[in-house]
Amino acid sequence: MAVAKGRIFRSVLPAALWRLEDPLSDIEQVELVAALSDKLVRLSGGTDHCTPLRLPSLLHVRDLIAADPFTPHSAESLERVSCLDRWTLARQFRAAFGTSPSAFRTMRRLDRVRRMIRDGMPLAEAAVEAGFANQSHMSRLFKRTYGLTPARWAALSLRA
């Protein structure tokens, strides 16, 4: 019934659908399936996964991504470094840090873009340096995240 009413689709799928022109990486596919399955379990009256967080493993993954957000990591590579299966990693990373590994990576890349723009780098160059497909791709994510276009943010940061 809830699926028919669209609650799942309104709460889980928009993150994947807002960027239809960009293919999902394997880790993003895992995150989407894990979120969808968790929603279905909750809606069916089942219980959430209550396994204890493996914080050292999660911190290792977080630190690996933060150290080099320009390098994409596959689900398989994150499984190896965390010693967790991809489904557990996706669920526990979100539980520990409030976001998915791929969203965490995007946020770190956008942090770098803000620094590059603040230091005077042109937007198109900052986008490429941060590993975005192009300036348009970076600008969409920037505005979605910060509520301002990169150009507007740059203008405001120059006045500050």
Image (tube, grey):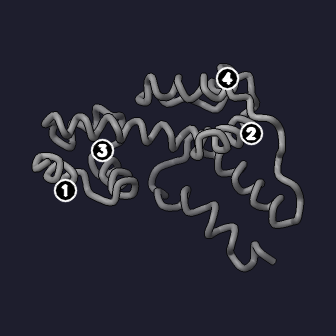
Amino acid carrying label 1: it is: Arg
Q: Dot 3, crowdedness within 10 Å: few (<14), some or many (≥20)?
A: some
- Rendered image quadrant of residue 149: bottom left
Mark drawn on residue 152? 1
Mark 3 vs 1, N-terminal side: 3
Measuring from the top left, give residue 145's x and y in whole percent: 39, 53
Residue visible at 88% across and 64% down in the picture? 45
Q: Nearer the viewer, mark 2 or mark 1?
A: 1
Q: Amino acid at mark 4?
A: Pro
4 vs 1, front mark: 4
Q: Give the label, 3 or 1, closer to the camera.
A: 1
Q: Earlier in the sequence, mark 3 or mark 4?
A: 4
Q: Amino acid at mark 2?
A: Trp
Q: Is residue 26 left or right of residue 140?
A: right
State which mark lies toward you, 3 or 2: 2
- Which residue lies under the disc numbered 3? 134
Marks 2/1 in contact by CB < 8 Å: the verdict is no
- How far, Cα to Cα, is label 3 from label 2? 31 Å
Q: Nearer the viewer, mark 4 or mark 2?
A: 4
- The crowd level at tag 2 (other Cα within 10 Å; few <14, some 14-19, many 20+) is some
For disc 2, the marked residue is 87
